[in-house]
Amino acid sequence: MAGELKNKFVYQLILSGSQVLLPLISYPYITRILGPINIGKINYVDFLSQLFIIFAAFGIPFYAIREIAVVKNHAVKRATLIQEMVILHSLFALLASVIFILLTISQWNQNLLLYLFALANIILSAFSFEWYLQGMEAFRFAAIRTILIRIVMLVAFFLLIKNAPDYPYYSGIFTVGFLLMALINGYKVAKDNHFVQQPLQLRKHLRPLWHFFLTTSAISIYIYFDTILLQHLTHNEQAVGYYTTIIKLVKICLVVLLTVGSVLMPRLSFLASTGDISSVKIHLDKSLLFIVTLGIPISAGLYLLAPEIIAVIAGEAFLPAVPVMKILALLPLAIGLSNLFCFQTLIPFKREKIFLKSVVIGGIASVALNLFLIPYLAEQGAAWANIITEIIIAIITGWYAYKIIQFSIPLRIITQTVITCLLFVPLIFLCRSVFNSSLNILLAAISGCVLLYGALQYYLFRNAAVRETFAFVIHTLKFKM
């Protein structure tokens, strides 16, 4: 089972790598062509549509992963569950689309194509079937599919986006990508399952889905609503462009941390359903150690190298957003921890009400902080509201998760990791004194910090997560060769 889990982690890591590489290759081109104002227009409509996609989902993605993982070995139950989820998701997507049109139709004359693509995304969200792939732990299929689609999208970016007025095409390419993903996923679902006419019980899912819906709605408030408030309180598309671009850059670093959660959630749901608490604790202890070991240096790097990261990836037009990145530097660590506590602990053990309580508190805090800070600090105010909210949620969910599983808190590892990261400061200062260009500074600093951190953690502090990761990489390379 351990080997099987490692293989799934490899495929999910490949998938996560593609999520990192696509922005890293496309952003330097896109941001320089479109600029902060057009990026602000795109991201405002995109973030607005995400609220309706969450409404259309009605909690199905989180709920269905858990339920599919439980019945994955029962073909009839699995096929019935899939049909029930698709019908419910389609109905909610239709309702969400109608509400989206009614609430935004007055703005369509400004950016018609952006809103049409957003509407298409809401409809397509009902047929993504990502919850099926995760619940069935089909990570190899998801990795290959996603990489191929993202290569197509990357080529389209460079072929279709030549000038600033081409900014609607940027959203259109993502919509086509979602369509391709839905078609490929739908084919796999149809191929893997035999659907026969069965009595469907839609109503039995509504109550648990309601808790997930309230939870995801509260989450959407502090993930997407801040951007909407920033636009409406400042009427400054450039500020929106700065803030949303930095959010996306910071969350690129979060992808690897969340890889562990996406692999373990279906496995933990299965183990929790069988009452195997000791195995759950082992997985959670390793996850926590991994997040701390990787999350702290990532946050340190984002803070210390903010000017170079922005200059290289987004371009010098986005340098006024350096303070925003420094404020949000702790975001990967905070979200990584809350993801562990929520999706690897509370949800597998069916503590949806506690999860809901936590994110409602976070949503209220987010709205209050944004309303207070944005009028005075604009995009920096939104950033402060974001990071404070995520820390609050991590603390609350961590408290409740610890009550369920008393996982080991690696205080010694945290101390050693912080001490190691302090050595990044003179190393980065040295790189800035030796090199002139932002690219050279960034490459030298990242290489030096990774080598320094890895060597000290491996040889001096003998960090179990670093040693196990290194051994796993070596074993995987030897196996492939």
Image: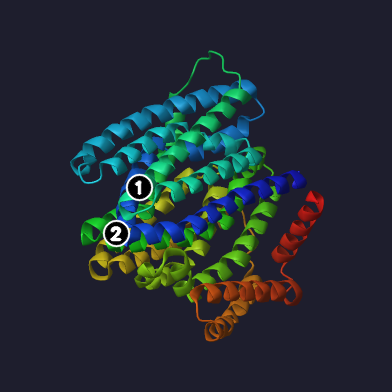
In which image quadrant can residue 321 be found? bottom left
Judge depth for marks 1 and 2 and give the one in front: 2
Residue 429 rendering spot, x and y as whole percentages: 54, 84
On the question of residue 365 being in view, the answer is: no
> For the point 53% across and 72% down, which residue is it?
301
Q: Residue at x 33, y 46 (%)?
A: 168
Q: Is residue 224 above or below residue 371?
A: above
Q: Where does residue 298 sit, x and y in percent of width and height?
A: 55, 67
**Relative to 295, is 459 above or below?**
below
**Image height check: is 266 above or below 27?**
above
Numbered mark located on residue 273 in the image: none
Element at badge 1? helix
Q: Residue at (44%, 58%) from the top-left corner?
A: 29
User: Disc 2 marks which residue?
Assistant: 37
Residue count near mark 1 (Cα–Cα under 10 Å), binned few <14, some 14–19, many ≥20? some
The picture quadrant where one finds residue 326 is bottom left
The quarter in which the N terminus is drawn is: top right
Nearest the viewer among 108 and 475 is 108
Residue under the point 38% across and 33% down:
123
Residues under numbered marks 1 and 2 in contact, where contact means CB atoms less than 8 Å apart: no
Question: Label 1 sits on what residue type?
Answer: Asp
Badge 2 amino acid: Ile
Circle 1 residue: 46
Q: Residue 216: where, in percent of width, then height?
A: 41, 45
**Residue at the far top in the pictured view:** 197
- Identify which residue, 116 or 341, lies in the foreground: 116
Residue 309 in view (yes/no): yes
Q: Residues within 10 Å of mark 2 (few under 14, many from 20)?
A: some
The numbered mark, 1 or 2, whose residue comes first in the sequence reads 2
The structure's colour scheme is rainbow
